[in-house]
Image (cartoon, grey):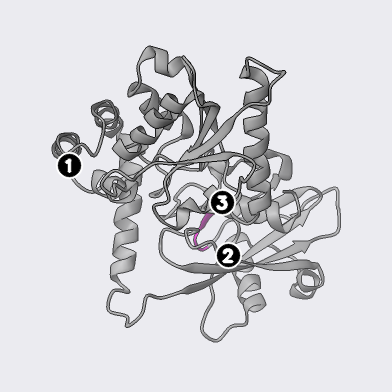
Amino acid sequence: MQYEFDFAVFIGRFQPFHAGHLQVVRTGLEKAERLILLIGSAWQARNPRNPWTHQEREQMVRACLTESENQRLLCLPLMDVPYNDEAWVRNVQATVAGMVTAHHATPHRPARIALIGHRKDHTGFYLNLFPQWSAVGVDNVRQISATPIRERYFSAAPETLLPSLVDTDVLPSAVASYLTGFASDAGAYQHIRDEIAFVRKYRDAWSSAPYAPTFVTVDGVVVQSGHVLLVERRASPGKGLWALPGGFVDGSERLLDACLRELREETRLKVPAPVLKGSIRRQEVYDDPYRSARGRTITHAFYMELEPNASLPKVKGGDDARQARWVPLGELTPERLFEDHYFIIQDILGLI
């Protein structure tokens, strides 16, 4: 069979994979010999916006395809880089190049590559970032969106909701079956339900405000001898995840004063304030609109580099932190870190 392209590239989060996504996948398989599916927001801790791992989402996709279609499907995880679009684009280019090198059958001829997708909203900005590839647009199926599906699934009774979504051609039946099984996992499913319930209650408390509130927080990125100071969160959201010590700014505080206060309260770090102030190497603002499930939250991060020492200062969890500890930078993994804190550390330390 002659295909228009050698490779079609489809980038998405698929949280969850729905009928609109399936139409794009089938169009890609019709037009290209192979479809490269880049599953975004990979290696994140489970949260209300990203409740399924990239492996789980790949299972949803493959369950909807035939054996021959699956043989032509290449699924790879794609990590977010929220504060560096160029690094994200580079990762996409490198991943696709690797797949082309491994699977292009006629190396003497340049591979014909097309980016496939639909421009449903601001999340489709990436379609403009790869002018070296052809573009294939696919109409959005009845404006189906994963967000309301996800919110209903974790709020309503899945045994009632999922059949109705299949009957209305919103979800493929194979995905509904997968989600039925996922709901029976009391641990992961209940964790997301609890997080969503907390967020809903949190937002309801601000529902009478004349405008949607914007919250201001601070985070301390304290580094010594290749270790960063983290705390384990005691409560929702992100209960049990590791985070930068920080919190909300009081109305009478300056940003740096708030950061130093949170450091004392959450870690009991016994380094004098003048030393901490003198150790500041960088200050940055992190404002990704989706960085917090609680609502629009802009954080100011302070990078403090303490003098190297063979022994790290003693720390102890306090206030909202169950525990505090120094973590080697080489052991940081995004799956265990709260919200975008992994990316804040990577950015402010220049590790990206």
Where residue 294 appears, as percent x and y from the top left, is 40, 62
Q: CA distance from mark 3 to mark 1?
A: 39 Å
Q: Residue at x 42, y 46 (%)?
A: 118
- Mark 3 — residue? 128
Q: Which residues are magenta?
A: 319-324
The spot of residue 9 in percent (x, y) is 52, 34
Look at the image and tell me whether residue 226 can be seen.
yes
Q: Residue at x 28, y 51 (%)?
A: 148
**Identity of the amino acid at label 1?**
Ala
Q: Tell me the distance, in whole angstroms, between the alpha carbons under discs 3 and 2.
A: 36 Å
Give me the C-alpha separation between circle 1 and circle 2. 36 Å
Mark found first going from the N terminus, 3 or 2:
3
Residue type at mark 3 is Asn
In percent of width and height, residue 11 lies at 50, 39
The circle drawn on residue 157 is: 1
Image quadrant where residue 199 sits: bottom left
Q: Is 114 drawn above or below residue 283 in the view shown?
A: above
Residue 153 lies left or right of residue 259; in this view the side is: left
Label located before the other in sequence (3 or 1): 3
Q: Is residue 322 magenta?
A: yes
Q: What residue is disc 2 on?
A: 246
Q: Are the residues flagged by discs 3 and 2 in contact, CB closer than 8 Å?
A: no
Badge 2: how crowded within 10 Å, few (<14), some, or many (20+)?
Answer: many
Task: Please identify, in this view, whether the residue under mark 3 or under mark 2 is nearer the observer.
Answer: 3
